[in-house]
C-alpha cells in the first residue's frame, strides 16, 4: 500500500500550480485525498485537469487566494520573494515548503527511482512509468512532461515503486533518498546556479550520496561527464554502480541500435545474454535512455525480459519529438530541446528518421544566461537543419542581460554555414514558415518556452 498524506500536506497551497513539476505533486496529493489549492498566471489545460481532480485553482496571483487554514505553501525556485501569496504566507506564519521537499515527502516509504542528468530525464522517467504500469506494478510517478499515452505528468499508484524526475538545476535533487539513482549525463548548464563543472560534479556527488545503503547508481558509460562522476563515486560506501552504454566496459552493454523510421531496435548484452527490444521513438539518445530504464528496473529485481517487452509500449512524451500534425504534405514536430547537446541529438534523430526530407527549424532560445554561455554552440547545432528561424530569447524566470540576444546564436549559425532568419515578431512565424515549407518537408518547433504554441498555427497556415 502506498503511503498517505504527510500532515503538513493536508491542505497545501501551490504558487505556480500549473508548472510541470508543481502540478505533478498537486495531482498526487489530490489523488491521496489532500485538499489542494493554488494559483497560476494563466488558464491552461493543466489547471482544468487539476480542477477535475478536485483542486481549487485561481488564475493570477493575489494575497486573497491563500486560505487562512492552509497547512503549507509550496513554491518552486522560480517564485520571487515579493509574490503576494508568499508575502501573505509570512504574515500568517504558514510554513513555506520547496517543491523538492514536497516531492521528497511523497516518496518516503516507497522504493524510489530518481532519474537525473542534464538531458533525458523526462523521457527516461516516462519510459519507466509506462513499463512498470504495463507490468501491473501500479507505480506512482512525477515527471516533467505529459506522457503521450495517459496524457498526464503524475499519478498516485498503489504499488511500492515511485519514479521521479530529479532536477539538478537548483540542486533540489539532493533532497531525495532513492533506492536507485540514474545519471544519464553530466554537463555544465543552469549557469545562474553553477559557476563551473566542479560545482556540477559536487552537486551530483551529493545526489548519489543520498542513495539508500545497498542501493544502486545506474550511470552512463559513454558520456564523459558521467564517466568522471563514476570515477569520483565508485568508492562510496554501500553503493552499487551499474554502468550502461556502448562502451565495451559497460555492465549493460549496447550491442546494436538499428533505426527503423520513427522507431529503434535495441540489442543489449546483460549478464552475458543478448536481449532485443523496440523503442517506439527515433534517435540513439532515446534508445540509450531506454537502456538506462532497463538497467534501473533490473536493479529493483524486475526480470529483464519482462521489462524489455514493456518498454516497447512507451510511445513518447509531449514535446519530445512529438508529431503535432501534417498539412500540405508537411509534418510539424515539436521538440523541447534547448541545450546544444539536446538540439544536436534531436536534429540528428530527425535526419536519421527521414533522411530524404528537408528539415526546417523554428528555434526559441531559453534563458539569457544559457544563451550567454552556450549561444555559439546553439548556433552550430542549427547548422544541421536546412533552414532555421530564430526567435527572441524566452526569459522564463530571468531578467534580461545587457547585450545578450538571439543575435549571438544567429551569428554563430551563419558562421557555421547555416541558413538562418531572425524573426522578432512571433505572430509572423507561422505564415513565414508555411511560405518556406514544401511537400515532404519536416518542420521542427524547438525550445523550452512557448514556441510549442506555434506548431498548430503553422499547420493552420499550411492548410489554408
Image (cartoon, rainbow, N blue to C red):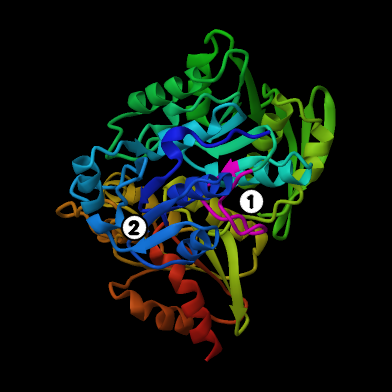
Is label 2 in a helix, a strand or a loop? helix
- Residue at the limit of the structure toward the bottom, as seen here: 464
**Mark 2 neighbour density, 10 Å: few (under 14) some (14–19) many (20 or more):** some
Tell me the residue that label 1 is attached to: 283
- Marks 1 and 2 sit apart, C-alpha to C-alpha, by 27 Å
> Relative to the observer, which residue lies in front, 99 or 170?
99
Mark sitting on residue 299: none
Q: Which of marks 1 and 2 is in front?
A: 1
Q: Quadrant of residue 131?
A: top right
Is label 1 in a helix, a strand or a loop? loop
Residue at x-position 18% and y-position 51%: 401
- Residue at the limit of the structure toward the front, as seen here: 69
Tell me the residue that label 2 is attached to: 415
Image position of 148 with respect to 213: above or below: below
Q: In which quarter of the image is the N terminus?
A: top right
Inspect this view and state whether residue 16 appears.
Answer: yes
Inspect this view and state whether residue 116 appears.
Answer: no
Secondary structure mostly taken by the magenta-highlighted segment of the chain: loop
Left or right: 316, with 445 as reference point: right
Q: Which region of the structure is painted magenta?
A: 141-156
Residue 198 at x, y percent in the picture: 35, 23
- Residue at the limit of the structure toward the left, as seen here: 402
Image position of 327 with respect to 194: above or below: below
Residue 335 at x, y percent in the picture: 51, 59
> Relative to the observer, which residue lies in front, 262 or 453?
453
Residue at x-position 41% and y-position 66%: 451
Q: Which of marks 1 and 2 is nearer the N terminus?
A: 1
Amino acid at each position: 500500500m502506498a503511503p498517505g498524506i504527510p500532515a503538513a500536506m493536508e491542505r497545501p497551497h501551490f504558487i505556480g500550480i500549473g508548472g510541470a513539476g508543481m502540478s505533478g505533486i498537486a495531482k498526487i496529493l489530490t489523488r491521496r485525498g489532500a485538499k489542494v489549492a493554488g494559483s497560476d498566471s494563466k488558464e491552461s489545460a493543466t489547471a482544468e485537469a487539476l480542477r477535475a481532480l478536485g483542486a481549487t485553482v485561481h488564475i493570477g496571483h493575489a494575497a486573497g487566494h491563500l486560505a487562512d487554514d492552509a497547512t503549507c505553501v509550496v513554491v518552486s525556485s522560480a517564485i520571487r520573494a515579493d509574490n503576494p501569496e508568499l508575502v501573505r504566507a509570512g504574515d500568517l506564519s504558514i510554513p513555506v515548503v520547496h517543491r523538492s521537499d514536497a516531492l521528497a515527502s511523497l516518496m518516503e516509504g516507497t522504493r524510489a527511482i530518481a532519474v537525473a542528468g542534464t538531458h533525458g530525464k523526462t523521457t527516461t522517467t516516462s519510459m519507466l512509468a509506462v513499463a512498470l504500469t504495463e507490468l501491473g506494478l501500479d507505480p506512482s510517478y512525477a515527471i516533467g512532461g505529459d506522457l503521450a499515452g495517459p496524457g498526464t505528468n503524475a499519478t498516485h499508484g498503489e504499488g511500492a515503486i515511485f519514479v521521479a524526475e530529479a532536477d539538478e538545476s537548483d540542486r533540489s535533487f539532493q533532497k531525495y533518498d532513492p533506492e536507485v539513482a540514474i545519471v544519464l549525463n553530466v554537463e555544465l548548464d543552469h549557469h545562474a546556479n553553477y559557476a563551473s563543472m566542479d560545482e556540477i560534479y559536487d552537486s551530483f556527488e551529493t545526489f548519489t550520496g543520498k542513495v539508500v545503503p545497498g542501493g544502486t547508481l545506474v550511470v552512463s558509460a559513454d558520456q564523459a561527464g558521467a564517466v568522471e562522476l563514476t570515477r569520483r563515486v565508485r568508492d562510496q560506501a554501500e553503493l552499487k554502480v551499474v554502468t550502461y552504454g556502448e562502451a565495451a566496459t559497460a555492465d549493460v552493454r549496447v550491442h546494436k541500435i538499428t533505426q527503423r523510421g520513427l522507431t529503434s531496435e535495441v540489442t543489449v548484452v546483460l549478464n552475458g545474454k543478448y536481449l532485443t527490444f523496440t523503442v517506439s521513438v527515433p534517435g540513439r539518445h532515446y534508445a540509450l535512455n531506454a537502456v538506462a530504464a532497463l538497467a534501473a528496473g533490473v536493479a529493483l529485481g524486475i526480470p529483464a525480459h519482462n521489462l524489455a517487452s514493456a518498454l516497447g509500449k512507451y510511445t513518447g512524451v509531449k514535446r519530445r519529438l512529438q508529431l503535432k500534425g501534417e498539412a500540405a504534405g508537411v509534418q510539424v514536430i515539436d521538440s523541447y530541446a534547448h541545450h546544444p547537446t539536446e538540439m544536436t541529438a534531436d536534429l540528428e534523430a530527425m535526419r536519421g528518421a527521414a533522411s530524404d526530407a528537408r528539415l526546417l527549424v523554428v528555434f526559441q532560445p531559453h534563458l539569457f544566461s544559457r544563451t550567454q554561455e552556450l549561444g555559439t554552440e546553439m548556433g552550430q547545432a542549427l547548422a544541421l537543419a536546412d533552414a532555421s528561424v530564430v526567435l527572441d530569447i524566452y526569459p522564463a524566470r530571468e531578467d534580461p542581460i545587457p547585450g545578450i540576444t538571439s543575435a549571438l546564436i544567429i551569428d554563430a549559425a551563419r558562421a557555421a554555414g547555416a541558413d538562418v532568419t531572425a524573426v522578432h515578431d512571433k505572430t509572423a512565424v507561422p505564415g513565414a514558415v508555411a511560405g518556406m515549407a514544401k511537400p515532404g518537408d519536416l518542420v521542427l518547433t524547438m525550445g523550452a518556452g512557448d514556441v510549442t504554441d506555434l506548431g498548430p498555427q503553422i499547420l493552420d497556415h499550411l492548410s489554408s
